[in-house]
Each structure stands twice: as structure tokens, then as C-alpha cells.
Image (cartoon, rainbow, N blue to C red):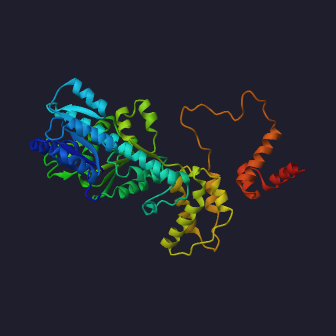
Amino acid sequence: MSSNRYPNFGILLVDDEAPFLRSLSIALERRGGFNHIYQCDDSREAMGIIAREPIGLVLLDLTMPHLSGEALLLQIVEEYPEVGVIIISGLNQLETAVNCIRLGAYDYFVKTTEEDRLIEGIRRAVRMQEMRLENQEMRRRFLTDTLEHPEVFSAIVTQDKGMRSVFQYLESVAASNQPVLVTGESGVGKELIAQAVHTLSNRAGPLVSVNVAGLDDNVFADTLFGHSRGAFTGADKARAGMIEQAANGTLFLDEIGDLSQASQVKLLRLLQEGEYYPLGSDRPKRIRARVVVATHQDLENKQQRGEFRKDLYYRLRIHQIEIPPLRKRKGDIALLLEHFLAVAAEEMGKTKPTIPKELPVLLANYSFPGNVRELRALAYDAMSQHRAKMLSMEVFRRALGQDTPVQGEAGDEPVSLFPADQPLPTLQEVGDLLVNEAMQRAQGNQSLASKLLGISQPALSKRLKKLSS
């Protein structure tokens, strides 16, 4: 993997004409970015190569001595049904093409067909094979509930099942060269996911991160593509863009939802063609980095409103990961609090304090609009003010006092709390339900329950006595 061979599986070219094999190999590498290629000019040797090497796709000529392409196609389909086959023949005959598809070929191209159509057809076949392999891998991981590289996720402190599913998905798509879209609210740790994708991919190059929020079209193009000398006033020397700096590694574009329409077109062309032009240059360069993008915005809604290109959205969401907010990972709150307090204590040269037993309960009833980033800030703030053996809860009480209910998306219909076809409960009944819910959330702590209800503790005690009587 360190050699960054793409695709992860091999592409076998079978043709008795050696010059055609060489020219096709060069075209696949230069135009398609494929460098995991095997050549065979004797059809009798093809099955042996498939048996020895990790072949996932075969580009097969029909008219060959010794063993015809049609006979070889039948053998491949019978013995290796998981291997895709594309016919590239000198015969431009509809009946032959239909027969090959009927026998199991994925596609059929004529050698004299323009190169662009052929490369795009091979790209489609590669993507289909990648998806098939990823689906197989995901099924295996989810059924066995395994992580093969848990150390990659050590920086992400969690015991949440949803996050574990995210990790399993990331391991499944690690070998792919397709973009990864990471979504989630601000502060959930999207940059840590990008780092995990990069590490799992085992790429030789670096992870290069760019926050594209607020970049106008020219700055975006210069940042990503770089420029040649004299491209514009002040460009006294050539400068490599972030794409080139991330060669054989990963390019992470954060806040992708803020891109202008013009910049979206440039990014789409980069992903579709795999090529870009540095500013002021008429010579294209190939992208040799995997692209990971992230946003806290809802791209589906944005594209429906015409603010984000639909074709770019579908190109980006080939592999999509949504990071759940902290309020949906309540089991992680106490774990993260312990972690951040320990790190803060070490940085500040203090002894890690004892955590009051009611603090995790208090925090479990806070919505954390700033997610993990906000919890970290609260832990550091509390640690900086800490003087006694027991951690003060004052910083956290202030946060709880500023809590606001989580709002739905703009334009959402208000959700009714009571079925329209049922009679409304009385105020007394609603009050009793609220008291019971508050006590359950506070795990029996009357002080915390009274704060959740916005009443005094004596008033809550009085209500509880009435309920028990």
C-alpha cells in the first residue's frame, strides 16, 4: 500500500499485440491515474496471472491466437465470477458485443473508439469493483463487529456504538481512492476523522489540510492548484499548490459547504478528470492525493436550494460519514470529561481532581451545542480555576444555566407533543410527568432535578411527597 498503487486491485490487459498493450498502459496511467497494471500478450497465461495476482478487472481482446478472447471470457466468468471483464476489440459488430455482454462481460469497446470514452468506461468499472469489495468488507466487519486497526482511532475518545460503526465503515473504504465526505455539527471532531482516513489509507505522502471557508475563487484556485512564474502581478516564482504538496497523501478540505459556485466547478472538474492546471500554466498535472472534505452544513438541503451543485454533491458523497453530536453520545460525556481533565492537569502542572458524582449526571442533561470542543473548553476552564481536592461544579452549572433546547432545521414543521385524536392531559398530570422525567434524568438527585424543572428543591420535595401519597 505504501507504493500507492491504484486501484487497490490489479487491472490485467490481455492482447497479443505488444505495442497496443504498451500504449494502453500509458493511457491508463496518464489519463486515468491507474498504475496497478499487469500485461499479458499470450492469452494462455492469463488464467495463471489471475490466480497469482490480486486481479479485479480484465481488459480483454477477442481475436487472439491459441485461446480466443471469448473462450477466455467464459473461463474467467466460470472460475472467477468476482473479476470484471471489459472487451476491447477491433471488431465493431453489434452482434458480437451483445453476445459478450450476455456471456458476462461488463462492457464492450472498439479499439478505434476515442480514448476518452474508453478511459471513462474503465473508471466506471473500477468504481463498481471498489463498491463491491467495500460492501463485502462492510458486511464482514459489521457481522463480526471487529476493528482491525483500533490504534488508528486512539485519539478519538469514545465508547459509543455509533462511533464504532463509523470506525468500521472507515476501515472498509480505506483502500478506495474515491473522495470521503465527513459531515457533523461544529465541534464533533471531523478533523480527527480525516486524520484516521489518512492513516488507514497507509499513503506515503502527508495529510494537507485547508479550511476553504471565506476563500474567494481566485484565492481558492491559487491555494489548491498553485501558480507558475508570471501568472499574475507579484508571482515572481512558481509555487506548488496544496494538491501537489499532498502528493501520494491526503488533501483535507474543511468547510466545503462555504465554497462559491465558481470554486465548486473547479473542484468538480478536479474530481471528475483527476487533472488540474496551475494558474498561468497550460500543462495539466494529475492529482495524486485522496480527497477528504468536511462540512457542518446540510449539503443535501443546500443543493436542493440551488446553493450547492448537485453533480458535485453526488460526486462527494460516494463515501459519506456523519459524526453524531455529543448529545446523542451521552455515554461518552463522563469518559471525555476524565480525559480532558487529565490532559489539562498535566499541561497546567496540577493534580487531577476528584470528580463529584453528580457532575456526569448534570452534564448528561446539557445539550452541548458546541459538542466535544465545548466540553473540552469547560474542562480546561474548570481545571484552571481548580484549587481544592474536589473539582468545583460552578463552571459547569453556569453552562447548564445557559442551555437552550436543540432547535430543528429552519422551516421544519413544529412537532406536536400530544396526539391530535387524544384528549389533552390536565396540568396536574403534565406536572407529575415532568417531575418523574426530571428525577429519572437526574438519577434520583433532587438538587439536579429541581434545576432541570426550574423550581426550588423544597418545592420539588413537596411535589414528590404528593406523588407518593
User: Within the image, what quadrant is residue 266 found in?
Assistant: top left
Residue nearest the observer in this picture, 394 or 390? 390
Among the 4 quarters of the image, the one containing residue 434: top right
Q: Nearer the viewer, residue 6 or 291?
A: 6
In the picture, the quarter occupied by the N terminus is bottom left
Residue 5, given in percent of the width and then of the height, sits at 26, 53
Query: Is residue 144 in view from this perspective?
Result: yes
Q: Is residue 53 visible?
A: no
Question: Residue 298: x percent and y percent?
Answer: 46, 39
Q: Residue at x 38, y 43 (%)?
A: 132
The residue lying at 44 percent from left, 35 percent from top is: 300
Instruction: Indicate left or right for 358 with 115 as reference.
Output: right
The residue closer to the viewer here, 439 or 237, is: 439
Farthest-out residue, front: 66
Give the total number of marks visible in the rendering: 0
The residue positioned 10% from the left and 44% from the top of the image is: 18
User: Of 216 and 11, which appears nearest the observer?
Assistant: 11
Say if 35 sits above or below 336 in the image. Answer: above
Q: Where does the image place residue 198, in percent across and percent down from the top left? A: 35, 55
Going by the image, does 398 lie left or right of 125? Answer: right
Outermost residue toward the left in this view: 19
- Left or right: residue 90 versus residue 108 is left
Q: Residue furthest right?
A: 469
